[in-house]
Image (cartoon, rainbow, N blue to C red):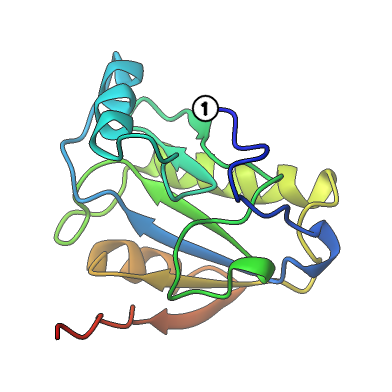
Amino acid sequence: MDLHGQGSRLLDPFAVVSVYFTHTSSAACSDDCLELLHRLQQKHRLEELPYNFLITGDCQAFEARGWQYESHFAELPQATSLVVAFVGDFSQRPPSDCQLATAQALLLESLKRRRLHPEYNLFVVGNAEAVQQELQLWPRYGGRRRRKRREVE
């Protein structure tokens, strides 16, 4: 989906100092993941998926908002962060080694393209407990961040 001119704000690559990992809390896939991504997109109707990147079960990284546009997570510092989601439910089961390697490769590519500050920190957001257990072992892990719940009036 073309986000240009739809109120989406551009990311300043020199300001991106945080990478937030989460999961889609959806079905997982190990092949034909493109079809699952299209179904996730349809659930969001006219909006783009709120993530910058998604990592699927077949160990591919897909661009949603990419390096160009801010994520659509109002609870996070959008102007200074990337949001990466593992496709599936990883509240109990961790992402595969291949998915984790893809995430590391995405971080390295972000650094190589100068789309991520060299002194970045990693965080986990949402109920992705198994993701948090894996990422807390990574060198740039900065902690867990709980998403703010919206008050119901």
Q: Is residue 63 left or right of residue 42?
A: right
Residue 5 at x, y percent in the picture: 66, 40
Graded by Cα atoms within 10 Å as few (under 14), some (14 to 19) or many (20 or more), the crowding at tag 1 reads: few
Residue 25 image position (x, y, % from top left): 20, 51
Q: Position of residue 126 (x, y in %)?
A: 29, 69
Q: Residue at x 36, y 25 (%)?
A: 58
Q: Residue at x 73, y 52 (%)?
A: 10
Judging depth in this view, the residue of 46 and 14 nearest the camera is: 46
Q: Residue at x 76, y 59 (%)?
A: 116
Q: Quadrant of the C terminus?
A: bottom left
**Viewer-closest of 152 and 65:** 152
Residue under numbered circle 1: 1
Question: Mark 1: which secondary structure?
Answer: loop
Q: Is 2 in front, or is 87? A: 2
Residue at x 21%, y 86% (from the top left corner): 151
Is 67 in front, or is 131?
67
